[in-house]
Structure formats: C-alpha cells, structure tokens
Amino acid sequence: MSLQNSAHIYGPFAALRPAAEHAAEVAAPPYDVMTTDEALDLATGKPWSFLHVSRPEIDMPKGTDVHDPAVYAKGAQNLRRMTNAGVLVQDATPSYYVYRMTSGSQKKTGIAATASIDDYLSNRVRRHELTRPDKETDRVNHMVALNAQTGPVLAVHRADPIIATIADRACQDAPMLRADVAGTSHEVWPISGSADVSKLTTIFDRMEAVYIADGHHRSAAAARVAAGRPEQGPHKRFLVVSFPDDEVTILDYNRVIRDLGGLSSVAFLTALSDRFEVNPAPAPVQPTTRGLFGMYLPGQWYRLQLRGGVPKNTPLLDRLDIELLSHHLLEPVLGIGDSRTDTRIDFVGGARGLEGLSARVDSGEMAVAFSLWPTQLQDLMAIADANQIMPPKSTWFEPKLADGLLIHVLSPINS
C-alpha cells in the first residue's frame, strides 16, 4: 500500500516549495492574520512574496471584492508564474519534513505531512471548534482555483521519543529552507529515507487520534473539496504541521467590552462583588490559575477571584475560564449571552500583551477589559476526545506557521 494512501492518518508528500535561494523572499505570514492593506504593504516591492498567491486581491484594482472569482484566478496565475520562473520547485520524492520555529529562546519542532480526510471525517483527526460557512467557502474556492493547499494546519500529536529522534537526526544537517517571518525563524528539513518514512507512518498510525489546534476552516474546506472529487488522489489529504503536545502552548485569548450595560462603574463593581472577590491591583493582572481574572477599567486594574472557586464536579467544558467568565459575569452582569454574535464584545490575542487590553479601554473604544488564564492544551484534547465544541475564541497559538514554504499540490500546476 502506498504511504500516500488515504488510509494512513499522516503520510509523506512531494511538496511544492521555494528553491532554497528564494525561501526568504517567498515566505509570508498566514493569509488570515492581516487586512488587505497590510498584505499590500508587506508585498510591495516583493514580486515573489507568497502574499501574491494567498492574498491575490493585492494585485487587483483597489476595492475589488476579495471573493470575486477573478481574485482566486489571479492567485492561481501568480502560483504558475512563480513555478514557471523556478522560484517554486516540486520535490520528486514524497517526504515528511521537519518544520522548526524558533522565537527567542523557544524552539518548536514539528513534522509536516498530509493528513487523511477520511480520518478527519471519522473524527480521528479531531477538532474542537465550529466553522463559519463563508470562511470555509473562501478556502474551498482558493484550493480549487490553485489545485493546491497553501496554508498548513497546525496540528498536535502525543509526544513520541522515536519521532523526536528522527526529527533531531534530520536537523543535524543544514536546513533545506530558512526564512524569518514576523520575528520567528522558520526552518525546514526533508525526511525522505524510506526507513524513517515508513517508521514515522507506522508510529502515527498507532495513535488513537491527532488534534487540530489552529486551522479548522482550512481542514473543513479540504474535506469539502475532497467530497466533490470522488476518485482517489492527493485531494483526499490535507496539509498539516504536527507538533508534539509537550512543545505546544496556548496563549491567553482575552476579552474587551464596549459598554457596561447601562451600569455606572460603581454599580458595576458592586454587581461583581456578589460573585467575585474584587481587589484593586497595582499592576496589570496576568492570571496564573483557573477562576482568577484580571479586569481593567479606565486607569485601574483589578484582580477578580471567583468566590468559592470552581467545584470539582464541574464538567470540563464549563471549567474553562472563558466559560466561567461568561456564566458568572458576561451573561448575568453585562447581558452578553452569545459571544459569537454580540457586537459589544471583541477578542484580543495574548500575543498583544496586557498593554493591548488597557490601550483599547484608555482610547475610549472599550469600557472594560478582561485578562484570562489560557486554555490548557490537555483540556483542549480532552474536549476534542469527548466530541465537544469549545466556545468561540478559546485559543491563541503563537508563533504562526508561515505560508509558502510547503504546499500540497492536488494536481499538476499547468504552465
């Protein structure tokens, strides 16, 4: 049986990738972390930036609808242009790839592979998040136009010493690709030896499950593309970089609220005291345990401790701090019942720091901000194992995988 067969949960693939000398020119931040104007600024004067493929509206007249079919066609044209120029080349041999991200003193080393759509549909490749159909459709249209998947899904697997040994051995050589993106070094090494490829495939196949951490819309879109192509082929798999669970950390995903629901600051603090111990804090509050929250009102941080703590028999999903904040404060005090649809709430990824919260309030844009203890990875995996769905904006992963370093081709790219 071919190691690229859809029966294997993870398998090798022949990546389309930058030629080594072009890696730094090609690599780009993920398509979904910037606006069109920001993408245009980053790509200006950089003809080989992958943003011309992932955000092709930057090469269209200003104001063009980003979902116009012509935009996706432009992305496909730009991909062909880069391939025809030899900026992108496709490996001849299916391989796994070691993908290492280094940010400061932290290193995260994962395995790039393709994951089985069949295992995704059977929930062996597990997810924890709902998706929006419009965002799925955008990725479907992009994949179909390009006949390729260009944005890897960040996945997690249980740490295994043999996988770590194979990866470490590959990293003894100089990297095949290296690029710096947004302050993070991204390095890639191929694992093409048949013994190591077979061993990795066997180890992954023995795993009960792997987990989608970041990239639910890309995964769901790949499944929709596969459903429209009943024949077997590369489209029955999707691109992932899978990291061991002992190297993945979830950052806090904080909340800012536009108003106090008609309450004065004094009345708001009084209402909170029924459910929380409320104490002014001399410095920004970074929660370090479940049930502890930081809160910022103009000019002042507070420490909020849930009265009575979290009962031990509380279901796992309800023990998440985002749910505790919702059940004990956002819903009863501020009247925010659905964080997915309520326009009074916004979300701030932990990478922006606590200063990002206070700045939103001090500017007058928001009335109050809350800092949260991050969702724990083991909780995420347990929730996915229980086939449950986490609340919106539960997790923030940093650093992000780069776009353009590894591409999964669904069918030959025509000149």
Image (cartoon, rainbow, N blue to C red):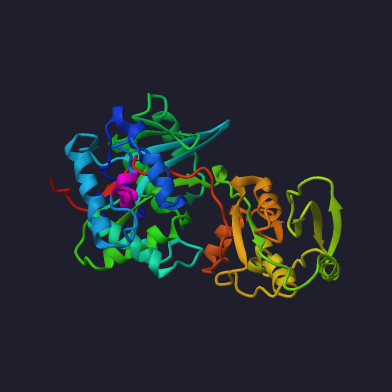
Q: Residue at x 54, y 69 (%)?
A: 388
Residue bounds of the magenta highlight: 51-59
Q: Is 52 one of the magenta-colored residues?
A: yes
Q: Residue at x 41, y 61 (%)?
A: 217
Residue 64, x across and y down, in percent = 31, 58
Of 204 and 129, the residue lying toward us: 129
Task: Please indicate whether residue 408 sits to the left or right of residue 389 in the image.
Answer: left
Where residue 361 sits, quadrant-wise, is bottom right
- Is 32 above or below relative to 169? below
Where residue 261 sits, quadrant-wise, is bottom right
Where residue 63 sits, quadrant-wise, is bottom left
Q: Is 292 one of the magenta-colored residues?
A: no
Task: Please name the predominant secondary structure of the magenta segment in the image.
Answer: helix
- Residue 118 seen in the figure: no
Q: Residue at x 73, y 48 (%)?
A: 286
Residue 124, x across and y down, in percent = 43, 62
> Farthest front residue?
62
Residue 219, x across and y down, in percent = 38, 59
Task: Please indicate whether residue 353 sits to the left or right of residue 83 in the image.
Answer: right
Which quarter shows the C terminus? top left
